């Protein structure tokens, strides 16, 4: 089962909107991250144990599903913990790769043209997921750049308004503008 890319995009957008802390992850966030990793490892072990009762390709698929679920859980936790655009993009890419490995394992049971089609579809799904992750990153970067340009333009207007003053009043106006626009 694949999760929609939009779940992680929402988190990336919160980063793009300035929700990320300037001081890095909190100790509470680290605790949650470590708990998530531990839960993913426990769930993987339990799923892996259930796979031992199966043989052949169905066992391989079962193991691959368990690995994919673990990667997904760990990557989502990692992206939320690090809370950066790079972390979200890397997470998307690693989850896409894990899904691709799962799809290839599913295709292994097929033969002939059916297998070729299955592998082609798996590769197409991987390429699409990678392209989405890269496009999301570019869109967020473009949005950030546009926001920065807007702030710079507003800052220049504020400085221009300060030119109407002189002396201490102008200095105070400029100082206020710098503070307001983070310059």
Image: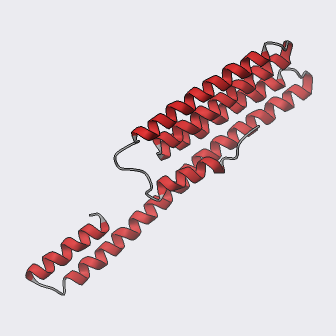
Q: How many marks?
A: 0
Q: Nearer the viewer, residue 63 or 100?
A: 63
Q: Is residue 14 left or right of residue 172?
A: right
- Name the residue at 90% across, 21% down: 111
Residue 113 in the image: above or below residue 29? above
Q: Is residue 101 above or below residue 20?
A: above
Task: Left or right? Give the position of 26 relative to 178.
Answer: right
Q: Quarter of the image for the N terminus: give it.
A: top right
Displayed quadrant of residue 76: top right
- Position of residue 121 measured from the top left corner of the image (x, y, whole percent): 80, 36
Position of 160 relative to 43 (above/below) = below
Q: Residue at x 39, y 66 (%)?
A: 149
Locate residue 151 relative to residue 10 in the image: left or right.
left
Q: Please give the name of the residue rendered at 74% of the width and 34% of the height, measured from the top-left corner.
A: 123
Q: How is the image coloured?
A: secondary structure
Residue 91 lies, in percent from the top left, at 57, 38
Q: Residue at x 47, y 45 (%)?
A: 83
Q: Position of residue 116 (x, y in %)?
A: 85, 28
Furthest residue in direction left, as rendered: 167
Q: On the rendered image, what quadrant is the C terminus found in?
A: bottom left
Residue 32 location in percent, x, y? Answer: 51, 37
């Amino acid at each position: 089962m694949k999760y929609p890319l939009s779940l992680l995009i929402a988190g990336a957008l919160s980063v793009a909107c300035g929700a990320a802390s300037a001081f890095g992850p909190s100790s509470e966030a680290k605790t949650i991250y470590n708990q998530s990793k531990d839960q993913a490892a426990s769930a993987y072990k339990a799923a892996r144990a259930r796979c031992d009762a199966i043989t052949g390709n169905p066992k391989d698929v079962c193991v691959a599903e368990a690995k994919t679920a673990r990667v997904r859980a760990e990557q989502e936790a990692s992206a939320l913990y690090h809370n950066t655009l790079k972390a979200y993009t890397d997470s998307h890419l690693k989850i896409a790769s894990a899904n691709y490995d799962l799809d290839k394992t599913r295709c292994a049971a097929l033969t002939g043209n059916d297998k070729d089609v299955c592998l082609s579809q798996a590769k197409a799904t991987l390429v699409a997921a990678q392209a989405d992750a890269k496009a999301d990153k570019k869109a967020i970067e473009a949005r950030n750049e546009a926001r920065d340009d807007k702030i710079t333009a507003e800052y220049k207007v504020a400085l221009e308004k300060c030119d109407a003053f002189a002396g201490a009043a102008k200095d105070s106006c400029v100082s206020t503008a710098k503070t307001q626009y983070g310059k």
